[in-house]
Image (cartoon, rainbow, N blue to C red):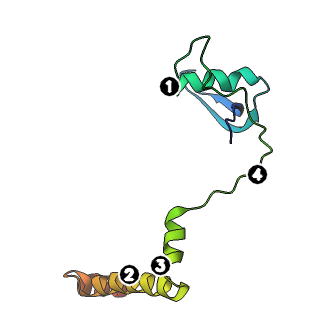
Amino acid sequence: MGPYAYVRQAYKYDIEWSKNSNRVTYKEWWYLESVQSSETCRLMFFQQGLGEYNEHTRDHPTGCALDSTEVTILNPKFMALQDRWTIQGIFGELSQSVFANIRDAMVSPDAFPRSVSVHLHG
């Protein structure tokens, strides 16, 4: 799969110069546009240090892959959680953490003074 190559296209607008012209402010939005040159991905391969360039090198991509390919990416940590715990177990673990934080907040040395202060001063 891959490699893919994109160029960031940025547009600046609402450009304003300060009165003494030493500062400029602007808003910006950008998007990625796929690169049309197949040579770009081949050169990028070497620029990232993934191979050593010479005219006889064969371990490089022939060009950029189509960016219309669908890819599914799994979150391995979440998959491990699903494998180990049921949904009830995950919520139970999270609930324990929440109640532990509440308990710590209620029994900390400054809990009572903070509560009184909030009650009196709104």
Q: Say which of 92 and 74 sits in front.
A: 74
| Residue shown at 67% from the left, 35% from the top | 3
Disc 4 residue type (three-letter):
Glu
- Which SS class for mark 4? loop
N-term-proximal mark, 2 vs 3: 3
Q: Is residue 72 left or right of residue 22?
A: right
Q: CA distance from mark 2 to mark 1?
A: 44 Å
Pick whichever of labels 4 and 3 is earlier in the sequence.
4
| Residue named by callout 1 | 49
Q: Nearer the viewer, residue 115 or 10?
A: 10
Residue that mark 4 sits on: 70
Q: Is residue 8 visible?
A: yes
Q: Amino acid at mark 3?
A: Arg
Which sits earlier in the primary sequence, circle 1 or circle 3? Answer: 1
Q: Are marks 4 and 3 in contact (CB under 8 Å)?
A: no
Which of the two discs, 4 and 1, labels the residue nearer the N terminus? 1
According to the picture, the residue beneath numbered tag 2 turns out to be 97
Q: In the shown orientation, is residue 118 left or right of residue 26?
A: left
Badge 4 crowding class, 10 Å Cα cut-off, few under 14, some 14 to 19, many 20 or more, is few
Q: Residues within 10 Å of mark 1 (few under 14, many from 20)?
A: few
The mark nearer the N terminus, 2 or 1, is: 1
In the rendered structure, the answer to whether residue 83 lies left or right of residue 71 reads left
Which amino acid lies under the numbered mark 1 shown in the image of this protein? Answer: Gly
Q: Is residue 47 left or right of residue 117?
A: right
| Residue that carries the numbered disc 3 in the rendered image | 84
Mark 2 and mark 4 lie on one chain; the one further toward the N terminus is 4
**Closer to the camera in the image, 69 or 7:** 69
Task: Give coordinates of residue 10: x percent, y percent.
Answer: 70, 32
Q: Are marks 2 and 4 in contact (CB under 8 Å)?
A: no
Separation (CA) of disc 4 from disc 3: 29 Å
